[in-house]
Amino acid sequence: MKEQVLNILEEIRPDVDFENEKLLIDDGVLDSFDIISIVQEFNDNFSIEIDVEDLEPDNFNTVEAMVKLIQKLQE
Amino acid sequence: MTFVSLPFFLFVFGLVVVYFLTPQKYQWLVLLVASYAFYWLNSKWLVLVLWGSTMVTFLTGFLLQKVYDKNQQAMQALGDQLTKDIKKQMKAQVKRAGKRIMLVGVLLVTAALLMLKYFNFFGENLNQLFQSLHWGATIPRLNLLLPLGISYYTLQAIAYMVDVYREKTCADRNPLRFMLFLSFFPQIVQGPIARHSQLAKQLYAGHRFDFRQCCFGAQLVLWGLFKKLVIAERLAIPVNYMFQHYNSFSGPILFLTVALYGLQVYTDFSGGMEIARGVAQMLGIELELNFKQPYFSTSIEDFWRRWHITMGSWMKDYIFYPLSLSKAFTKLSRRSRKILGQYVGKRLPAFLAMFIVYFLVGFWHGANWKYVVYGLWNGTFIMSGILLEGVYAKAREKCGIQEEMVTWRMFRMIRTFVIVSFGRFFSGALNLSTALTMFQRTFYHWKDISFLTNGKLFDLGHNNANWILLVVAIVVLFYVDYVHEMGVHLREVLARQPLVFRWVIYIGAILVVMIFGHYGPAYDAASFIYEQF
């Protein structure tokens, strides 16, 4: 899953080193438009529904956190 | 009693003494009394509007928490019988109930804001519509007074109710404490718009007197006074003159008008913010940063990340994200992808949400169409920037421009400044038609630069000495902003200097504000530009 998440992220923001960035939200690497695009892609690709309440920095600061969120919503 | 009056500083001094002499357990009560006293002194009986909104917000949070707690207890009571499906079902049920409670609370406090701030605006526009349709009905104009800070505390109240609903913060159970959260006097006038999870605990906790924090707070207040009294008030004279006599000025002077007006708004608003944050810091409370060197922005999007930050983040969390991720917008996205293709279709819901956000940002500033256009002016540039990102990237590549180039960064900063400045016509002019006329006139007579030599520039209410003083003060302002942009914490640097040097700086700064602060006949100590919003 991590590979698929990385592909989605790199397609949206090819200029970001997602493997090594650990504070994607807190450091302002991703903006609100990126977040909306990412959520749309995750919803479509993983058949989940990310709610506005899930838009916490902790859920989007790293690739691992995003994978964890997707897994939680798939349960 | 405003932030730049002697009574206010006597009030703050007295409060700091009483606050730190009071046992920590009761310090919040001192703040509550001081906050309501401040509000009463400024707004008299309008305090009841603040109290009413506070009670509605408190009760909404209280009921939400009660519903959530009851559900939690019910789930615990089920013990082993609580399966994943039942848990999900119960959570969905309680969320539905919670949503209804939250919406009632949000509608009630928003209705108070709409009624008091926008009733006459809606009335006038509807009357015009009725007239054009030849209907006899007219909506009367009401003489409504706007309670101090209603545009700020209403947003703070909405954020609280939504956060309790989203379970991002726990509801307050003590109505008196909650009254303090919505009335804390340094931020009631013009923000920053705080979140409950960030501010409430600080307000309710006791604080020990910390000399260093108190000094830092006082320095921030002094810097705020410098911005407000030395720069903003001094800029107000030529800016007001130029806005009133725009018909007699050529393009370059009109552009100078909006550029100076932008600077006036920045120093006025951020100066007030510095005073608010400084006073709070003296009491051991840290308020959120509302400005981050906006003149160093490299795009309009970047500008709005640095300007009125707490408002931007409020709009993002409570309007932009909920709209973009709503079912209706998701459906729209799927449909538009089929019709308009992947690239536009995917972005359309976010663009639409962004359009609504900037409409609201404009409308929040005031009940006038000029503010709506001001909001949309900014929103349009942000959207076009995102939409044309690929085109710009290709153009940069063709021209051999690299993102890291200093000249490229400078160009982007100037470009942002020009766009923001033109947008200021809409917020600064008397009304929309005046703004459009000024906007149009700005492009006339650019070849005529005689204003630089004919002395007209100095005929705007200030003598040469005042202009020189303004230029020096603005250079100081930009130097400080530049140092902050470089990540240097000036107050900490100053704290490491020898005692004598420090006190020379402090006394010098106090003297500068006292001597060069603008207290002329046109000076009105009551007004902060953003206070009226």
Image (tube, rainbow, N blue to C red):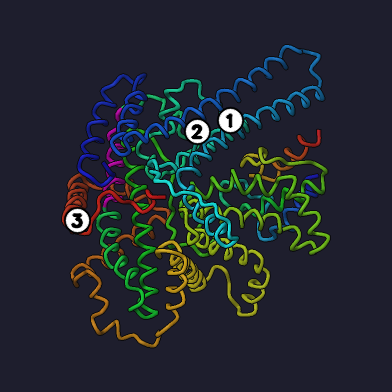
Name the chain under label 3: B
C-alpha distance separating marks 3 and 1: 45 Å
Amino acid type for the residue under numbered disc 1: Val
C-alpha distance separating marks 2 and 3: 38 Å
Residue closest to the eye, B68 or A56: B68
Amino acid type for the residue under numbered disc 3: Tyr
Residue at 51 percent of width and 27 percent of height: B58
Q: Position of residue B128 (x, y in %)?
A: 53, 59
- Is residue B394 in view from this perspective? yes
Residue hosting label 3: B519
Do dots 3 and 1 share one subunit?
yes
Residue at 59 percent of width and 35 percent of height: B162
Q: Quadrant of residue A59?
A: top right
Residue hosting label 1: B164
Residue hosting label 2: B196
Residue B1 lies within the magenta run:
no
| SS state under label 1 | helix
Residue B430 shown left or right of residue B324 in the figure: left
Q: Residue furthest front?
A: B136
Name the chain under label 2: B
Q: Which residues are magenta?
A: B209-225
- Is residue B496 in view from this perspective? no
- The prevailing secondary structure element of the residues shown in magenta is helix
Say whether disc 2 or disc 1 marks the residue closer to the N-terminus: 1
